[in-house]
Image (cartoon, helix red, strand yellow):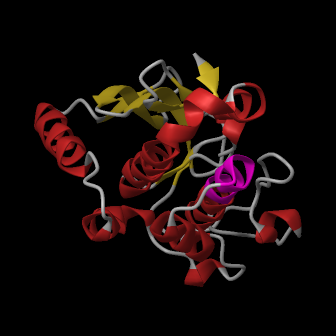
């Protein structure tokens, strides 16, 4: 299983026909996290795996954080140079990690287009709005189903929403548990949907647990 960076640098030809669903997979995956107030904080091509069916898997949750809402800010700076939002690059005292994720998502999508020298008018427009310099002007990823309904190609949104609802009823998507020192932590445990697999421990409130 290769990451997106490897596909784009070493094996463009088989990846090229699948770039659109891969980009939608990134949007959908981050939308799921953000809907549960979890920011990844290190979105980059190296942290996006693509299997032999070109299904996207988000990995490396070492610096992920759970917040109260989109507007909660944290004061620790993390991420990879070149893939972090301007407010992190400029080392502002605090920033919204959810809104910073949006910028990174847009940056990755535009990078994919640049490497493939292909275009997708809708995805490109979304990516540019996600990559707005002003955090408040970036599109909310949780609204992605509205965008996909406007797309000329039907994507897997209905399948994913159905899977979320089923798993949510079972209580398996997000579980809270006490660790050995009594603090609460959130865990996304074995989430399986059509084009997203996440299995990760999450930090809470910007601190390691």
Report x, y in % for residue 33.
43, 48
Q: Is 191 in front, or is 36? A: 191
Q: Quadrant of residue 128?
A: bottom right
Relative to residue 94, is residue 136 drawn left or right? Answer: left
Residue at x 63%, y 20% (from the top left corner): 2
Image quarter in which the C terminus is found = top right
In this picture, is 124 found above or below 171? below
Residue at x 53%, y 27% (from the top left corner): 50
Q: Is 114 in front, or is 43? A: 114
Report x, y in % for residue 106.
61, 62
In this picture, is 91 found above or below 207? below
Residue at x 24%, y 29% (from the top left corner): 172
Residue range highlighted in magenta: 108-117
Q: How many marks?
A: 0
Relative to residue 108, is residue 34 drawn left or right? Answer: left
Residue at x 26%, y 45% (from the top left corner): 156
Residue 6 visible at all: yes
Report x, y in % for residue 158.
18, 49
Residue 60 visible at all: no
**Dominant secondary structure, magenta:** helix
């Amino acid at each position: 299983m290769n990451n997106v960076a490897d596909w784009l640098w070493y094996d463009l030809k088989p990846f090229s026909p699948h770039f659109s669903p891969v980009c939608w997979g990134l949007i959908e995956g981050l939308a799921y996290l953000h809907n549960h107030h979890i920011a990844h904080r290190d979105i980059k091509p190296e942290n996006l795996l693509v299997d032999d069916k070109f299904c996207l898997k988000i990995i490396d949750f070492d610096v992920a954080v759970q917040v109260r809402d989109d507007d909660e800010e944290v004061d620790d700076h993390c991420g990879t140079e070149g893939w972090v939002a301007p407010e992190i690059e400029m080392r502002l005292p605090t920033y919204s990690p959810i809104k910073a994720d949006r910028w990174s998502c847009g940056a990755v999508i535009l990078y994919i287009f640049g490497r493939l020298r292909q275009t997708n008018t809708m995805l490109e427009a979304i990516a540019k709005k996600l990559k707005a310099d002003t955090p408040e002007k970036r599109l909310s990823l949780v609204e992605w189903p509205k965008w996909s309904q406007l797309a000329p190609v039907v994507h897997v949104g209905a399948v994913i929403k159905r899977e979320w609802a089923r798993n949510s009823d079972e209580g398996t998507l997000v579980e809270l548990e006490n660790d050995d020192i009594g603090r609460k932590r959130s865990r996304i445990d074995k989430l399986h949907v059509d084009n997203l697999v996440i299995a990760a421990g999450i930090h809470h409130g910007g601190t390691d647990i």
